[in-house]
Image (spheres, rainbow, N blue to C red):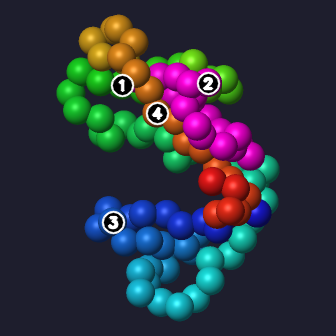
Amino acid sequence: MYSVCFPNSDGCCTDSSGSANPHSNTTPTPIPLSELNLEDILIKPGDLPAGFSGGQIKDVLPGVFDKLNVPKADQFIFQQLVRNGDLTGGVVLLLFTSLERC
């Protein structure tokens, strides 16, 4: 299960209904990881500086993760970055079922 929180344009955390209260003591509603569409929360138009764009989305982590001491994520997604037509890095989103796992 994953607690969903969506940052809005002000950087405040909102729940899936759009209600915002970054200082409340309420608990986010847990949802199964399988119900998350990770592509929807990756790079969006306007997120990157001029000349950059989101590239291919992969289900394989970049090789550097083999050398790092990062626990195996329960779910992940990797999107390459493109600058002026050339690959130039990427964004990795790692999800864990609990804080103890990460």
Disc 3 residue type? Gly
Question: What segment carries the magenta color?
Answer: 64-81
Q: Residue at x 55, y 73 (%)?
A: 15
The label on residue 32 is none
Tell me the kind of residue under disc 1. Answer: Ser
Which residue does the numbered mark 3 point to in the structure image? 11
Looking at the image, which residue sits at the far bottom? 25
What residue is pinned by disc 1? 53
- Image coordinates for residue 76, horizontal then vertical, percent: 65, 39
Q: Secondary structure at mark 3?
A: loop
Q: CA distance from mark 4 to mark 3?
A: 19 Å
- Which one is earlier in the sequence, the residue at label 4 or at label 2? 2
Distance between the alpha carbons at the discs numbered 4 and 2? 16 Å
Helix, strand, or loop for circle 2?
A: helix
Q: Which residue is mark 2?
A: 66
Label 2 or label 3, whichever comes before in sequence order: 3
- Pointer 4: what residue? 91
Q: Quadrant of residue 100?
A: bottom right
Crowd around label 1: few <14 · some 14–19 · many ≥20 (10 Å)? many
Mark 3 to mark 1 CA distance (whole Å): 22 Å
In this rendering, the answer to whether 39 lies above or below 51 is: below
C-alpha separation, residue under disc 4 versus residue under disc 1: 11 Å
Question: Per the image, is 3 magenta?
Answer: no
Q: Is residue 68 magenta?
A: yes
Rendered residue at 62%/83% (across/down): 27
